[in-house]
Image (spheres, rainbow, N blue to C red):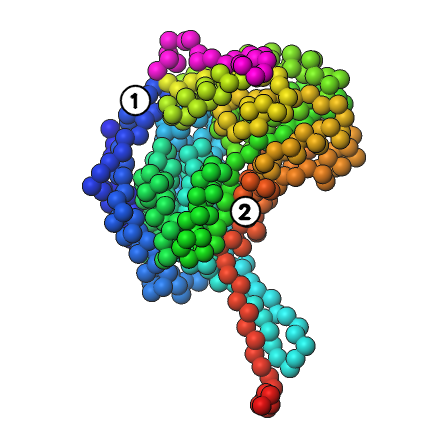
Amino acid sequence: MKTYPMFINGEAVRGAHSREIINPANGRVFAKVPEATLGEVEAAIHAARDAFDKGPWRTSTAQARGRILFRMAELVRKHASMLAELETLNTGKPIVESEFDMADTATCLEYYGGLANKIHGETLPVPDNAINFTLKEPVGVAGLIVPWNYPLMLAAWKLGPAIAAGCTVIVKPAKQTPLTMLEFMRLVQKEIPELPPGVINVVTGDGTAAGATIVESMRVDKIAFTGGTETGRNILRGVANSNLKKVTLELGGKSPNIFFADADLDAATDGALFGVFINQGEVCSAGSRVLIQKDIFKKFIDRMKEKTKRVKLGNPMKRDTKMGPLVSADHLDKVMSYIEMGKKEAKLVIGGRRPSAKNLKAGYFVEPTIFETDNKTRIAREEIFGPVVACIPFKDEDDALQIANDTPYGLAAAVWSRDIFKCLNVVKNLRAGIVWVNTMQPCYVEAPWGGYKQSGHGREMSLQGIEEFLEVKQVHINLNQNPIGWY
């Protein structure tokens, strides 16, 4: 069993207390990490503050920061196999998916490495004999709070723009899945000595302790959080009670995946299943509400049912596995409680059980599950974050839009039809931050990610992602040599 340290001010810190990390595929403890104390979290904040206010990082060039991000990307690519295996052991996601995540992590770091020296202000033509321009400056110390479903990739979504902007950071991985971030940081400490101490600190522990300390600290200038909506509310309360620091929130979703009768049924069926069953449904943008036009409702449900039978549950380290276990026993209990609720309020089409295979009983596996329902049931309205889909019939375009927008969330949506006019009208009227047409779940660092309504504040990735870690300073240079003459 391996024990991993935290990283504070350039040093590996073992900590006085530890937390056991469980392999969700078999329920066994396979690693230990520190459970950060209040003092250790405060030490990480202090290190980040000093590195920003006093250290060489403050005068580092954009080119130097970009080179560091390129080196980080190289490390991820060089050690991709090891990191992917560790990600799968820690999260339960199939190894093939973890490999894609490592490639996306490296691409994100490369993107922001290239963007680091392209941050600039603008000159403004004010009506005076003056020169007026803006500067873009780092916001300061950033707390990066990362969820458990894409541990290293979503850390990179925050770390890349923060470092490119010139911030210093405290990274707080999810308590269930800290291992790839800790292993990545070990590689960075070993292979990138030019990174000054205190620029990147990683602390592990519970969100109500470590996370809350970062959120409420008067010495932290920015919080970037991905996770549940209720935790997002708590973060806003914590920020309101401290220094009103800047906040980016990427929260939950109940994304509609809309299928019109003229859609290509083969592509549409694949899109419906991929949209909700990828990563065991543990995806904030999961198409967990499948809206199907009544003309094809029964046919489409039958096709989904038949294809779902081919989804192979199994050892996530095997390359032919399509669905691994859920991340933890607690999360399995939550998902199963929703499934039992669904059996009472909706029609079960397929799934809804723990698998009976002997080799899966010790892990946190659940069958991919499909329900027929309407948009009023709890399984259609609340985020389950598992492989559970609510299939809802609709009559026409207006009905589809009414159902799709009838949700407190607004992260993502998709629409499937051969009629481009219909697709674009739906795109225009959907209240969601990301809308896909005739596909589901593509995600690129070049494009902004974030939602409307209770799905969050701000955007990650793309040019907009780095703006979240910058402040704008106006500079006015007076060219009039005479006194103002007001008095």
Mark 2: amino acid? His
User: Taking 476 as reference, is 298 left or right?
Assistant: right
Question: Is residue 480 in view from this perspective?
Answer: yes
At 45% across and 55% down in the image, what residue appears?
A: 245
Q: Against 210, is 292 above or below?
A: above
Question: Is residue 184 in view from this perspective?
Answer: no
In this view, the residue in front, 395 or 341, is: 341
Q: Position of residue 61 (x, y in %)?
A: 44, 62
Mark 1: amino acid? Arg
Q: Give the SS element for disc 1.
A: strand
Confirm whether the magenta stretch covers residue 350: yes
Tag in front: 1 or 2: 2
In this view, the residue in front, 454 or 151, is: 454
Q: Position of residue 305 (x, y in %)?
A: 60, 13
Give the magenta part as a residue range. Answer: 343-362
At 33% across and 44% down in the image, what residue appears?
A: 210
| Badge 2: residue crowd in 10 Å (few <14, some 14–19, many ≥20) | some
Quadrant showing the C terminus: bottom right
Confirm whether the magenta stretch covers residue 397: no
| Badge 1: residue crowd in 10 Å (few <14, some 14–19, many ≥20) | few
At 38% across and 51% down in the image, what residue appears?
A: 216
Taking the view exactly as shown, the residue that stands out farthest to the left is 16
Quadrant showing the N terminus: top left
Identify the residue position indicated by label 2 in the image.
457
Q: Label 1, label 2: how many angstroms apart (C-alpha)?
A: 37 Å
Identify the residue position indicated by label 1 in the image.
28
Query: Of callouts 1 and 2, which one flags the residue occurring earlier in the amino acid sequence?
Result: 1
Q: Position of residue 439 (x, y in %)?
A: 65, 30
User: Taking 101 as reference, is 12 left or right?
Assistant: left
Q: Give the SS element for disc 2.
A: strand
